[in-house]
Amino acid sequence: QLQLVESGGGLVQPGGSLRLSCTASGFTLDYYGIGWFRQVPGKEREGVSWISRSDETRYTDSVKGRFTISRENAKNTIYLQMNSLKPEDTAVYFCAAQLRTHYWWVALDYDYWGQGTQVTVSS
């Protein structure tokens, strides 16, 4: 069974940090581009960051300089390090895998999705 599982979400104060993990089972992430998306109620899923099979990275403008995406192939895991968190970063965060990349920020371009992990930034 092909599965992605996110972890690492939680409640953090503004200015704090969290590291999200996305671990795959049933397939190897080496061959996939991996994206992190986030969604708040009533809004579309937003592309946050992406890492290619060759470790090329992309970020949406609002998280540049604060978030870092990385992969650890030995653990079949992708990470999203989130620093200097702001209340507007509050959302459910999803990871997703795409075999072929066209537009990294487009949710429909992805083949597999995790169930999401809640991130809440609040004092």
Image (tube, helix red, strand yellow):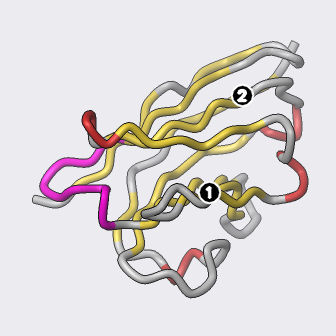
Please provide percent x and percent y for residue 49.
Answer: 66, 55
Nearest the eye: 114 or 24: 24
The residue that label 1 is drawn on is 37
Left/right placement of residue 16 relative to residue 57 reads right
Please provide percent x and percent y for residue 39.
Answer: 67, 55
Label drawn at residue 121: none
Instruction: Determine the residue positioned at 50% across, 37% down.
Output: 79
Residue 24 in the magenta stretch? The answer is yes
Instruction: Determine the residue positioned at 18% across, 48% down.
Output: 25
Mark 1 or 2: in front is: 1
Please provide percent x and percent y for residue 36.
Answer: 58, 54
Task: Name the amino acid, label 2.
Answer: Thr
Nearest the eye: 109 or 77: 77
The residue that label 2 is drawn on is 120
Instruction: Determine the residue positioned at 45% across, 75% down.
Output: 110
Whole-Å distance between the Cαs marked 1 and 2? 15 Å
Instruction: Determine the residue positioned at 57% across, 75% down.
Output: 107
Left/right placement of residue 115 relative to residue 31 reads right
Task: Name the amino acid, label 1.
Answer: Phe
Nearest the eye: 4 or 50: 50
Residue 95 in the magenta stretch? The answer is no
**Considering only vertical position in the picture, is 86 above or below 22?**
above
> Considering the numbered disc 2 on the image, is that residue within a helix, a strand or a loop?
strand
> Considering the numbered disc 1 on the image, is that residue within a helix, a strand or a loop?
strand
Left/right placement of residue 93 relative to residue 123 reads left
Q: How crowded is mark 1: few (under 14 residues within 10 Å), some or many (20 or more)?
A: many
Q: How crowded is mark 2: few (under 14 residues within 10 Å), some or many (20 or more)?
A: many
Please provide percent x and percent y for residue 4.
Answer: 31, 50
Specify start and end residues of the magenta stretch as a single range.
Answer: 23-31
Q: Earlier in the sequence, mark 1 or mark 2?
A: 1
Image quadrant in which you'd find residue 119 = top right
Q: Are discs 1 and 2 less than 8 Å apart at CB?
A: no
